[in-house]
Amino acid sequence: MIGLGVDAVDIERFREVLSRTPSLKTRVFTSAELELADTRKDATASLAARFAVREATMKALGVGLGAFDFHDVSVRKTPTGAPELIVSGRAQELAEQLGITQWRVSLSHTHIVAVAVVAAS
C-alpha cells in the first residue's frame, strides 16, 4: 500500500453549503455524479460521500486542497454496483509520481455523516 485516506462529511452542514452556493455542485462534481445523485432518495447524502472521496484521495496522495482539480477525481458505479474511483488530470500525474497503479474506494453514509475510504497501491 502506498497511501490511505479517510474523510467524513456532516451531511446537514454540506446541505447548507450547497444551498448557499448552488454553483458548487458543478464546480466539484461531474455530470455523471450529479445525474446519479438525482436518482437517490437523498441526493445530498450521495454528493457528501463523493465529496469525502475527493478529500480522502488527497490524503491518500499526501497532498492538500488545491493540489488537483475536484473534477480530477470522481466515482462511478461498476456493472455490479460497486463504486469505482476515477482519477485523471493532475491527480493522475501525482499518482504516477508515487507509483500508484490501483485504487480502492469505499463509501458509506447514515442520515448524519458520509464517509469515504480510499486506498492507493
Image (cartoon, rainbow, N blue to C red):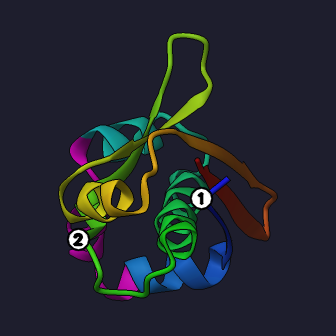
Q: Secondary structure at mark 2?
A: loop
The residue that label 1 is drawn on is 49
> Residue 15 appears at what percent x and percent y?
53, 75
Q: Is residue 9 magenta?
A: no
The amino acid sitting under disc 2 is Asp
The residue range painted magenta reads 19-31
Q: Is 24 or 76 nearer to us in this picture?
A: 76
Query: Can you give x and y, in whole percent of width and height, for residue 52 in the image?
Result: 57, 67
Earlier sequence position, callout 2 versus callout 1: 1
Disc marking residue 67: none
Crowding around mark 2 (Cα neighbors within 10 Å: few <14, some 14 to 19, many 20+) is: some
Place residue 20 in its image quadrant. bottom left
Q: Is residue 29 visible?
A: no
Residue 113 appears in the picture as rendered: yes
The residue positioned 31% from the left and 65% from the top of the image is: 94
Figure check: 60 above or below 89:
below
